[in-house]
C-alpha cells in the first residue's frame, strides 16, 4: 500500500493548487523502484521501467490535446510501475468515469452545465475542422469553473479497482 503515500499528497496538492509537484512524483517513482527491486530483484528494474513507460506513451495524445495534465500522466506511470499496466488501464477507465461524474456534479453546483457543454462541443468541432486549439481550458483566463482536480479521481479509481478488481 505504499502507493497511498503518493496518492494522498498528490491529491491534496491538486485540490488546493491544481498542480502536481514533481518532488512527490520523484518520491513516488523512487518508492516504486524500491518496491520492485525488493520484490523481484534486478528483474524488478525492468518491470519498473517497462510498466512506468507504457502509460506515458499511451496517454501522450491526451496530453497533446490537453485533456490530461502532465501530473496526471506521471501519476498513471507511478500506478503502473507499482502494479502493472493492466491494472493501470482499469484505473484509467474508472478515473475517466469518476471524473465525468465529478464534472457533472461541479457543473450542476456552479449552474454552468449548458455553457460548459457548449464549450466542449465547440472545442471538438475545432479539432475536427483541423483548427487545433492551444488548450482545452485555460485556468488563468477562465478560473476554476471548468477544472477538476483529476488526481482525486485517479486516487478514487485506485481504491475502487483494488476493491472491485484487484491486481492479477
Image (cartoon, rainbow, N blue to C red):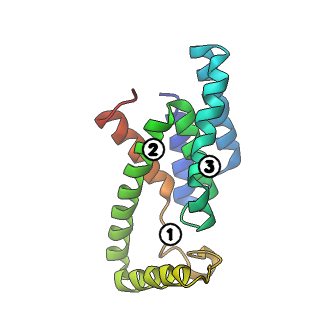
The residue under label 2 is: 89
* Vertical arrangement, residue 38 with respect to residue 79, above or below: above
Residue drawn at (60%, 26%) of the image: 47
Task: Assign a secondary structure to mark 3.
Answer: helix
In this rendered view, identify the residue nearer to me: 40 or 162: 40
Q: Which mark is residue 57?
A: 3
Q: Is residue 39 above or below residue 51?
A: above
**Where is residue 37 shown, x and y percent of the image?**
64, 18
Lower position in the chain sequence, tag 2 or tag 1: 2
Other-residue count near label 3 (Cα within 10 Å), few / some / many at <14 / 14–19 / ≥20: few
Relative to 145, is 131 on the left or the right?
right
User: What element does badge 2 sit on?
Assistant: helix
Q: Which numbered mark, 1 or 3, is in the foreground of this view? A: 3
**Residue 147 numbered tag:** 1
Left or right relative to 118: residue 135: right
Q: Quadrant of residue 143?
A: bottom right
Query: Which quarter of the figure has residue 54?
Result: top right
Tag 1's secondary structure?
loop
Tell me whether circle 1 and circle 3 mark residues in contact (CB < 8 Å). Answer: no
Residue 1 x/y as whole percent? 47, 28
Residue 115 picture location, percent across and down: 41, 86
Image coordinates for residue 113, horizontal then vertical, percent = 35, 80
- Check residue 82 in the rendering and tell me which mark sits there, or answer none: none
C-alpha separation, residue under disc 2 versus residue under disc 1: 23 Å
Of the residues under marks 2 and 3, which one precedes in the sequence?
3
Amino acid at each position: 500500500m505504499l502507493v497511498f503515500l503518493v496518492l494522498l499528497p498528490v491529491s491534496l496538492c491538486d485540490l488546493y493548487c491544481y498542480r502536481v509537484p514533481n518532488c512527490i512524483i520523484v518520491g513516488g517513482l523512487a518508492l516504486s523502484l524500491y518496491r520492485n527491486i525488493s520484490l523481484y530483484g534486478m528483474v524488478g528494474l525492468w518491470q519498473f521501467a517497462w510498466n512506468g513507460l507504457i502509460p506515458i506513451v499511451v496517454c501522450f495524445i491526451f496530453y497533446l490535446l490537453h485533456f490530461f495534465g502532465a501530473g496526471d500522466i506521471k501519476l498513471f506511470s507511478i500506478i503502473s510501475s507499482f502494479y502493472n499496466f493492466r491494472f493501470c488501464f482499469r484505473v484509467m477507465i474508472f478515473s475517466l468515469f469518476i471524473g465525468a461524474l465529478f464534472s457533472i456534479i461541479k457543473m450542476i453546483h456552479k449552474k454552468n452545465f449548458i455553457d460548459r457543454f457548449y464549450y466542449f462541443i465547440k472545442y471538438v468541432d475545432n479539432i475536427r475542422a483541423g483548427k487545433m486549439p492551444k488548450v482545452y481550458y485555460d485556468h488563468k483566463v477562465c478560473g476554476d469553473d471548468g477544472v477538476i482536480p483529476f488526481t482525486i479521481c485517479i486516487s478514487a479509481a485506485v481504491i475502487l479497482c483494488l476493491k472491485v478488481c484487484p491486481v492479477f
